[in-house]
Amino acid sequence: MSHAGDRAPTASLGLLDATMVGIGAMIGAGIFVLTGLAATTSGPAAILVFALNGGVTTFTALSYAELAAAIPRNGGGYAYVREVFSAPIAFVMGWTRWFTYMIAGALYALGFGANFEEFFHLYDVALPGSALIWALVAVVAFVALNALSTEASGSAETIITLVKVAILAVFVAFGLTIVDVGEFEPLFPREGGVLSVLPAMGLTFIAFQGYDLIATVTEEVENPQQNIPRAILLSVLVTVVVYLLVVFVAIGTLGADALGAAGETAIARAAEDFMPTFPLIGTGASLIAFGAVFSTISALNAVVIGSSRVAFAMGRERQLPDRLGHLHHRYGTPFVAILASAVVMLIAVVVVPIRLVGNLASLFSLLGFVIVNLSVIRLRNQQPDLRRPFEIPYYPLPPVLGIVLNLLLGFFISPRTWLVAIAWLAIGVAVYWLLSRRREEEPLPEEPGPTPSDIEEPEVTIEPGED
């Protein structure tokens, strides 16, 4: 007998919706906040930083595309690792990916609160409450939307992402007309030279995570074996092109030194110099602030989707409490998994410093991507005849490069972040041990005894003459 909570997810997302989940997660606050910080470290070579990170990202994206087509299940990287590695390794992968998405959700929520407040300040409008309050409101709002309808959250992601890409396209269109290529000479700063690119890559890598969220909703996408690989690769391609154009315009109009001095407001500062005043919206800075609001909102929505699906997959595999792996009988969404993810996001919004949030998300992504690349190699060896609707070109070079380069970038993450990451892993080990003990102590289901209808009554015959 099947239970409502055990039914399969409904495939309600098309190729465009799936692609927008990836683009929405990647083009978040990162491009607005990190461009100036990258310019501070690497000067005009910041454009190389984004190009090289795009290349590193593509190697792992190819691995995700092959695995998603071969193993079309919700859970993304966790589902693939569960297929090819032992249960403890799969748990570590799921535990860290779940944490990554939740902690990234806190980052995007805090970014939304600050940008939302700043947007209204540009019009001399004082909002009630603080940026922290608006961050919490955003988390609650998108958790509610995701809990009620996967289709609605997917459609919202598509609309919001298209709006923010359009805003960045306007920024690029105006900027390209006045770019001064002389701002890129010399390409590398005097201090650090070519090596200055590596720390900046580690700093900005968080802006390239998010395409993997597409794989977490595999079972909710139409024709997933074709659409998931396409959506992953399309989202990476579009994001890298957008990033390179925006960084090219920002450096070519404002200059690397001024861009670095502007820090987290670099793109808005560049927009003030060359963008005209728009009806209703106002200055170029106002348009960019508006885009930043949409960027953080779409990224938040994407990680709410992704984090809950990882928890759902782990609950379904009984590596987290069973209730996380059930769908709501009415809404058809992983309701409990969404609420559990929301609780951690809300706590992180209040208590975790924003810089640590960003570094943790980057570190766990890098380590998770290493395991995914290992998974595609191991699956090729274990199941060479498995049907693979998409195969990595020039295999095994891309996954090997993905492993080496992700590990290299991990060395540029601060020791403090590594300590916090190890602490989270230690908590995960405790959770895994406790759940394993509980499973062992659960009584085995008893064999059902025969029912009255199963017992054959002896046939009684009456001989003539007997009473």
Image (tube, grey):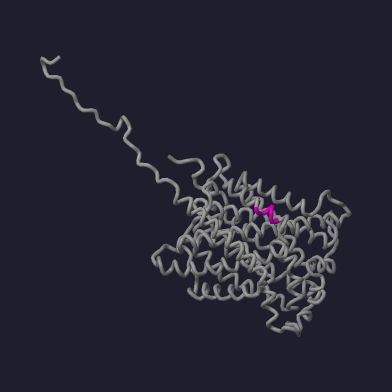
Give x and y (percent) for residue 133. 77, 51
Number of marks drawn: 0
Q: Is 90 or 272 nearer to us in this picture?
A: 90
**Residue 163 visible in the displayed image:** no
User: What range of the chain is rendered magenta?
Assistant: 344-348
- Residue 205: percent from left, percent from top: 65, 69
**The N terminus sits in image quarter:** top left
Report if residue 405 lies within the magenta region. Answer: no
Examine the rendered structure and indicate whether residue 276 appears above or below residue 304. Answer: below
**Residue 377 appears at what percent x and percent y?**
47, 70
Decide whether residue 346 is among the magenta residues.
yes
Per the picture, the main secondary structure of the magenta-coloured stretch is helix
Q: Dividing the picture into quarters, in which one does residue 26 lie? A: bottom right
| Residue 76 image offset from top left, x and y in percent | 54, 59
Q: Residue furthest right?
A: 124
Q: Can residue 268 be spotted in the picture?
A: yes
The quarter of the picture where the C terminus appears is top left
Is 25 placed left or right of 32 in the picture?
left
Q: Residue at x 56, y 42 (%)?
A: 328
Residue 47, by quadrant, is bottom right
**Residue drawn at (78%, 79%) of the image:** 183
Residue 14 relative to residue 289: left or right: left
Frontmost residue, 398 versus 158: 398
In the image, 54 versus 196, the foreground residue is 196
